[in-house]
Amino acid sequence: MRRLSTVYALTVLATAAATTVGATAQNAPATGEVRRVVTKLDSAGKAIVMFDNQVPLVAGRSPNGTAEMWVTTKSPAQLSFVDDLAHTKIGLQPPRNGTVFKIIDFPPISAEIEKRPPDMLQKIVGAENTPRKGHPPTHPYMHRTRSVDYAIILTGEIEMMLDDQTLKLKTGDVVVQQATNHAWINRSNAVARVAFVLLESEEP
């Protein structure tokens, strides 16, 4: 379910989600970077900085630059004072009982992408990660996962397409997706950067 090939395919085609192996693929171009600060406790219980680094947002075969900031695989969430949990291998669906924090750069969509089959991304998500309740997708980027997704528009403008309506979102807007069909589509002339936190959910 979390095979590397599936993860790479999601990076190529998805949003949040989706979309991760391209972020660590060798020789892939970076679309930008994000300063990430991670804290921990030292042996005396003092709060210190664990990581303070620039994380590249890397595009695979798609133009969407993506990187995980942190991943947890348990609830309550585990703490790591040694390992960088951003390197946990995942797919678009967050780990069971886990969470994913990622940043994605969405460039303006191309005409070629819009000509692809409307179930393109949903097929890659896979039946095992798709909630049973929901309509068939109507756009190549449309998909749904068994998760609650928090999205924060950091820069730019982007459209969120649902089954029969489309909302235009701008910098500072936030979205809560509850296992619903959606497609992130940038129809502006500049890159839109979005932060996502995905949490595994129950079946809707």
Image (cartoon, grey):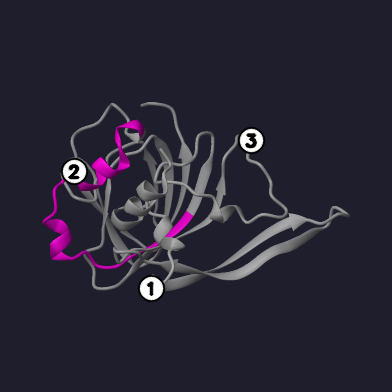
The tag on residue 119 is 2
Q: Are discs 3 and 2 less than 8 Å apart at CB?
A: no
Position in image of residue 143 (x %, y %): 27, 43
Q: Which residues are magenta?
A: 102-128
- Looking at marks 3 and 2 on the same chain, the residue that comes earlier in the sequence is marked by 3
**Residue corresponding to mark 1:** 29
Nearer the observer, disc 3 or disc 2?
2
Residue positioned 32% across, 70% down in the render = 191
Residue positioned 41% across, 49% down in the render = 4
SS type, badge 3: loop
Residue positioned 55% across, 49% down in the render = 71
Nearer the observer, disc 2 or disc 1?
1
Q: CA distance from mark 1 to mark 3?
A: 36 Å
Q: CA distance from mark 2 to mark 1?
A: 27 Å
Q: CA distance from mark 3 to mark 2?
A: 35 Å
The tag on residue 131 is none
Identity, as a three-letter code, of the amino acid under mark 3: Pro
Q: Is residue 106 magenta?
A: yes
In terms of depth relative to the viewer, which is nearer, 87 or 139? 87
